[in-house]
Image (cartoon, rainbow, N blue to C red):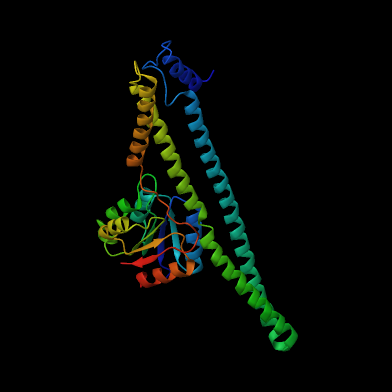
Amino acid sequence: MAKTILAVDDSASIRQMVTFTLKGAGYEVIEAVDGQDAFDKASHHQINLILTDINMPRMDGLKLLELLRKLAQYKNIPILILTTESSDEIKAKGRAAGATGWLVKPFDPKRLLEVIGKVIG
Amino acid sequence: MTELQSVSDKLDNKSEGKSVLEDKDKVICNNAADEYFMGIKEDLNQAERLVSDAVNNLVINFRYISKLTESHHEMVLAIERMAAPEGNSCINELLEKQMVIANQIEQELEMAITSLQFGDLVAQLLAHTTRQVEMLNVELQRIDRQGGWQGKTESEALDSIHSGISKAVDVVKNKSKKKPVVQQGMQMGDVEVF
């Protein structure tokens, strides 16, 4: 059975590029437009990995990360950050909040799939 | 006469003892300045709309080319299967070439995925710049409302104006969020697994 990935980004073009890459590799993809949308969808679906942006309206990626890590079913699910942000300061915040990894945009599809394959098991 | 000219004339006349700036005078951020700020924001919004439109079209083109490539690939494989029993070396050679071309198109499409993310980076930068322009406009208006030019000499008034502008810029710098995009090109970003 295909693993399900929740792709969270307020940019429609990024969501489409992520979905295109992941579906091409055989993953099921659920899209969310911001942290709040992602949190709602994560509560209603069985997700195997979350790939989220940081800067988003309503709820940002770090807040989403914090909230999900408080839920038993998302304590050990890989959560990767895909963002334009690359400072050590924000990476440290993400790591402290429970991020599994950090990818700086723009992403390379092959590299993204490698990292996902590595952390999703 | 524009407000800027009016203020300038008042400053000129003050040295002749004819008129002075009053606290109610909008020295830094008058209507002309407000219109200028509005123009900048409209230009930034227009740039955002153009980029967004271009990205949407490019993504549609990308998906269509990708689907066509997939169909082409399948067709080559089907022809290969049909031609195999005949053992026609010319057809097989042509099919091999077709397969190489199909693989090259797929590789190019993968590279386009990285480049097509420019819309998100540009949109974030434009939003950041728009916020900074808005904040500067608001800060200059606030300093204008505070006034403090009344009864000052020309040079004192100018000093006061310069100091007001510097203060506004400092406030904006302090209030501004860190620039969200530092990338200077569309090369793949760093990857780190914790």
Residue B64 position, x and y percent, is 62, 60
Task: Tell me which residue sits at (47%, 45%) in the image.
Answer: B126
Residue B13 quadrant? top left
Q: Residue furthest front?
A: B16
Q: Nearer the viewer, residue A111 or B182?
A: B182
Task: Tell me which residue sits at (42%, 15%) in the image.
Answer: B14
Quick check: B193 left or right of B187?
A: left
Instruction: Determine whether B22 is above or below A60 in the image.
Output: above
Residue B193 position, x and y percent, is 34, 67
Task: Tell me which residue sits at (57%, 45%) in the image.
Answer: B50
Residue B136 position, x and y percent, is 40, 34
Quick check: B186 left or right of A90?
A: right
Residue A28 quadrant? bottom left
Instruction: Determine whether A110 is above or below B154 in the image.
Output: below
Q: In which quadrant is the N terminus of chain B drawn?
A: top right
Q: In which quadrant is the C terminus of chain B drawn?
A: bottom left
Q: Is residue B142 visible?
A: no
Instruction: Determine whether A28 is above or below B38 in the image.
Output: below
Q: Is residue A114 visible?
A: yes
Residue B62 position, x and y percent, is 59, 60
Q: Nearer the viewer, residue B142 or B20?
A: B20
Q: Nearer the viewer, residue A6 or A112?
A: A112
